[in-house]
Image (cartoon, rainbow, N blue to C red):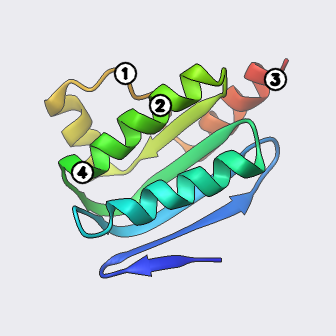
Amino acid sequence: MASTRGLLKCWVEQGNPAAIVRAQGEVDLSSADILRSCIERAFRRARPVVVDLSQVTYMDGSGFRVLETMTARAGGEARAFWVVPGGHVRRLLTLLGLRTIPVADSLEEAIDRCFLARG
């Protein structure tokens, strides 16, 4: 089931071994709750969760707050959690110095890291 608000489309796919949250479009104050809801839905489906933001063209502070909150929650639950940023999100992560958010360079890398976390 996909959730859409404004310019953001977000859905959860069941992968192996992780639930994969896919987002396309823009994450801002009006749509950050959609991203949060999708990640929470993924948390109910699988222990490891990967958030694929490779198709996100814009993200403001509200989106980064969602990622920080979900990173902290995953850590508290001893859950593997990885974010795959696209170019815009990666640039902002670097500029903002947000090193607490676990970043993988590709979806394949994130899934491999989830397999390693299970072993």
Q: Amino acid at mark 1?
A: Thr
Q: Which mark is residue 71?
A: 2
Label 4 secondary element: helix
Q: Amino acid at mark 3?
A: Arg
Residue 34, position in %: x, y? 43, 66
Q: Judge whether 58 appears above or below 106 on screen.
A: below
Q: Amino acid at mark 4?
A: Ser
Residue 51, position in %: x, y? 53, 48
Label 1 secondary element: loop
Q: Earlier in the sequence, mark 3 or mark 4?
A: 4
* Residue located 47% across and 38% down the image: 70
- The residue where tag 3 is placed is 118
- For the residues labelled 4 and 1, the Cα–Cα distance comes to 16 Å
Residue 85, position in %: x, y? 40, 46
* Residue located 77% across and 53% down the image: 15
Specify few, some or many for label 1: CA neighbours under 10 Å numbering under 14, 14-19, or 20 or more.
Answer: few
- For the residues labelled 2 and 1, the Cα–Cα distance comes to 8 Å
Do callouts 2 and 1 mark residues in contact (Cβ within 8 Å)? Answer: yes
Specify few, some or many for label 3: CA neighbours under 10 Å numbering under 14, 14-19, or 20 or more.
Answer: few
